[in-house]
Image (spheres, rainbow, N blue to C red):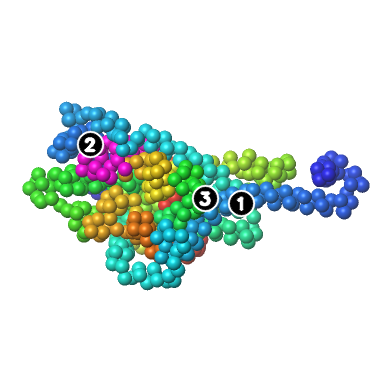
Amino acid sequence: MKALKLGFMGVVAVLMLVPMYLLVVNAFKAQQDILTNPFSLSPDLLTTEYLVMALSNPDFDIVKGYAVTILFVVLVNALSILLACPVSYVISRRARRPYRLLLLLFVAGTFIPSQVLLIPVVYTLKFLGLMNSIPGFVLFETALTLPFSVFLYSGYISTIPRSLDEAATIDGAGVHRTFWSVIFPLMRPVVATMVILNTFSVWNDFANPQILLGPSSGLYTITTGIYAAVGQYSTDYTVVFPTLLLAAAPPLIAFVLLQRYIIGGLSTGAVKG
Amino acid sequence: MTRNLLSVRTGPAAGAGPVRRPGRTFPSRRGIATRARLATASMVLPALALFVVMIVIPVGLSVYLSLTDWDGYSADPGFVGLGNYFRLFRVSEVLTAAVTTLIIAGAGTVLLNALGLGFAMLVHRKSRLNSTFRAVLFYPHVLSALVVGFLWSALLGTTGVVNTFVTEAGGEVLPFLSDPTWARTTLIGVIVWFGFGVNLVLYIAGLQTVPQDLVEAAQIDGASRWQTFRHLTLPSLAPVVTVNIVLSLVTLLKTYDIVVSLTGGGPAGSTQTAAYLILSDSFGNSALGFGSAQSVVLMVVTGLLALTVSRLRAGADEAVAK
């Protein structure tokens, strides 16, 4: 029974991993070899030529793509923490009705599909003069993180004893001081979860950057760049595999290193629907 | 002034009589209250403002645009009432997309949960090997759906790896992505490969709450594995199952990225989902009013499901609390 189960899981594991194996080995092969010997790992076939070519693809500067995407990840995370934490603190410390309604308003936002918002957001950003700009994109992307962050943070804060706030107040700290130097440091686990979640959702987002940072902005994230580079040559596998490998490598490496935290963070996020 | 009074109230000199007259302390209290209110406002308003500008107003705008025939350029959109909504039922593209979306949501939900729960049963016990299996089943989910779609389209295309094997074995090229029915099936398969790891993890978390002493007791009493699962494990997992099912539905209803990269909506529009059509109608075909009507419908359907989630969850929470 046990051997049967192990055998079965082994087969499943191989099936799950085969696509990734093919992605990795074929990123180092010529078109003809990909077509005839996709599984081969023979050293004579392997070359880094195509990976180097992908790095200098004229359609998509992937190094710049990394930089732009990392910039967005950092900005959205920082802004999201800065905005969502204090409001969650107020919400979870006040029992009065307006604050409960505020929580309800934010939570309602978790169930709005972001593609549905894209059309009107384009015109909202145009009206604000922020269309095709980094601030416009970062603000929208941050707004998308707020509902779930507020939900998660306010739930977490209500488990932190109020006596800590009171002690800080008696020592003369104002609300801001109380929050940032007493409560916020205690929120580390939940903030870490949210940072993991937001990092992956910004890194992997496609529709929003594709439309809010149109071609006129000249800004490509990893995903929109891949779309520009791979979309048109989808049968030239010497472009497809190396480019996809370069895009897939960072999240996969992060996953290998931080597996437990990432599984925890992303599955918490799944609950937001 | 306020400062002085404040220091008198809390400071060591609090006993000093003359300053404590009620008439004097009143304004100071109000000053403190105002200040506290300002501090609170400065914590709430930035987030609220961003949320209102980027989410609440756009939702309202969407509803408004859905009642117009706006093309995205003209100065004033013509009001057409519910015309766009009636048109939804007459445009075959929209109906096809609705059917495709429902098929994906329905079949996808069944498969995601069957595999999620099935594998959770196999690998939920804590061991090093099991956590490796979990990671292997979960890993596709860290990739972008766009990358996953491109990868599978490279593997399953007419000249892709899989077809290389099929033709070498003497078979004919399989139309994974070039026949409408095949393409829909492939799309669902890839979505499941990409996403069931999340359901797996949620089910594993749920299984950890199933009382193990009861499971052992049942086994000692001679219950078969299936009986234990059917009458003990599954009932205590009920809330987790509900949550998983509705969450899969909500997620699958907005399938977009993977369609773009795997099939591009083709062949012949057979894999266009609601979200895909909304964006291509709105921006590609300059039919913003019509696209907005589709958005509003998708939003309402998703919202209703979300409401169902919270209802069901409330019930499940109560059941667990007992």
> Mark 2: few, some, or many residues within 10 Å (few <14, many ≥20)?
many
Q: Secondary structure at mark 3?
A: helix
Q: Looking at the image, which is closer to me, B285 or B29?
A: B285
Q: Which residues are magenta?
A: A228-257
User: Which numbered dot is residue B45?
Assistant: 1
Q: Dot 3 falls on which chain?
A: A
Question: Could you tell me which chain the residue with mark 1 belongs to?
Answer: B
Residue positioned 61% across, 51% down in the render: B44
Q: Amino acid at mark 1?
A: Leu
Any part of residue A152 in sight: no
* Residue B52 appears in the figure: yes
Residue A238 got which mark? 2
Q: Residues within 10 Å of mark 3 (few under 14, many from 20)?
A: few
Is residue A252 highlighted in magenta? yes
Name the residue nearer the viewer: B164 or B283.
B283
Q: CA distance from mark 2 to mark 3?
A: 42 Å
